[in-house]
Image (tube, grey):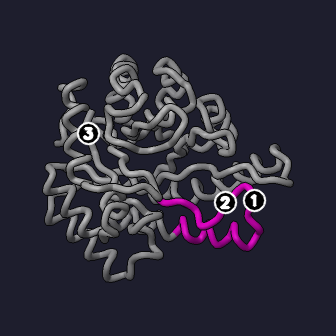
């Protein structure tokens, strides 16, 4: 089990570019990084030349990109037909960019319920969209990972809805990203992880206040990080992720809530790392 880093905290703290954020992650000792598409790593943010420059930057810094965070342009559950096509085209471009960066997974959530639309209609609209994305990604060797979001207005907001979406999409390259802090906000304990079995491809360290999604320094909130890690170890998660082409799972730090203030990004990362390595000394950056 390795510790990775999402690049978004440096964007939130100081509007850092993707390349600058990669440099900061490398300076802190990380090997594994997750480019944060909604902030500064999406196709819309990068010219063709910049995309190649990012690849060269990662290679020169000794970084291995693991999970590409890239959300659709629109809320899929309520998008118009034209918006659906725009979102699909954007994710196609993102999948192709992931391949350029030598990554084999792309992550986003299923979206939110909308007023005025039936729940089953919304659900099936998302299922069909996810199937299309998976079908585009599969021949390119890319897995699509759904991340559970903890609030009730998200379609996939707990383990039960995660399992249902996995079953309904029914694609071999449709997988799960678990976020420990999101599980805490959803009031789910570590035993729930067993229900996701070998669908887990990636994970996030995050921590929050009891009722608020804050992405604060790991160890300062309510998430039972040590217990979730112990559950994954009991599941022998490193063995399970071999089917995705990995020797070990990477669990990446997600810090700095959108809209919040991040005074010292590097300090927050260091404090989070210190806490994780105190409770899980078997984990390392490389």
Query: In the image, 88: left or right of 140?
Result: right
The answer to which image quadrant residue 283 occupies is: top left
Where disc 3 sits, the SS reads helix
Task: Determine whether 156 is above or below 134 in the image.
Answer: above
Query: In the image, 89: left or right of 249?
Result: right
Residue that carries the numbered disc 3 in the rendered image: 272
Which sits in the foreground, 138 or 251? 251
Q: Nearer the viewer, mark 1 or mark 3?
A: 3
Q: Which numbered circle lies on residue 78?
A: 1
User: Of label 1 and label 3, which has the lower sequence position?
Assistant: 1
Which sits in the foreground, 92 or 233? 233
Where disc 1 sits, the SS reads loop
Where disc 2 sits, the SS reads loop
Q: Position of residue 222 (x, y in %)?
A: 42, 28
Which sits in the foreground, 249 or 142? 249
Residue that carries the numbered disc 2 in the rendered image: 75
């Amino acid at each position: 089990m390795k510790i990775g880093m999402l690049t978004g905290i440096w964007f939130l703290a100081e509007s850092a570019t993707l390349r600058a954020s990669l440099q900061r992650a490398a300076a802190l000792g990380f090997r594994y990084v997750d480019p944060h598409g909604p902030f500064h790593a999406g196709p819309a943010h990068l010219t063709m030349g910049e995309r190649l420059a990012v690849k060269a930057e990662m290679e020169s810094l000794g970084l291995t990109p693991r999970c590409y965070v890239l959300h659709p342009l629109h809320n899929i559950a309520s998008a118009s037909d034209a918006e659906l096509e725009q979102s699909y085209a954007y994710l196609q471009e993102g999948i192709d960019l992931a391949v350029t960066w030598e990554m084999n997974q792309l992550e986003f959530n299923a979206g939110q319920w909308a007023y005025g639309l039936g729940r089953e209609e919304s659900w099936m609209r998302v299922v069909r969209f996810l199937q299309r994305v998976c079908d585009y990604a599969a021949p390119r060797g890319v897995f699509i990972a759904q991340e559970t979001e903890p609030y009730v207005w998200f379609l996939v907001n707990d383990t039960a809805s995660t399992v249902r979406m996995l079953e309904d999409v029914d694609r071999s390259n449709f997988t799960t990203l678990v976020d420990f802090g999101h599980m805490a906000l959803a009031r789910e304990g570590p035993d729930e992880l067993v229900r996701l079995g070998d669908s887990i491809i990636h994970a996030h360290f995050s921590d929050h206040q009891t009722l608020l999604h804050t992405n604060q320094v790991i160890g300062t909130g309510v998430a039972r990080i040590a217990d979730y890690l112990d559950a994954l170890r009991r599941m022998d998660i490193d063995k399970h992720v071999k089917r995705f082409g990995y020797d070990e799972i990477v669990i990446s730090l997600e810090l700095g809530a959108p809209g919040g203030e991040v005074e010292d990004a590097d300090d927050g990362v260091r404090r989070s790392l210190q806490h994780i390595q105190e409770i899980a000394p078997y984990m390392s950056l490389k």
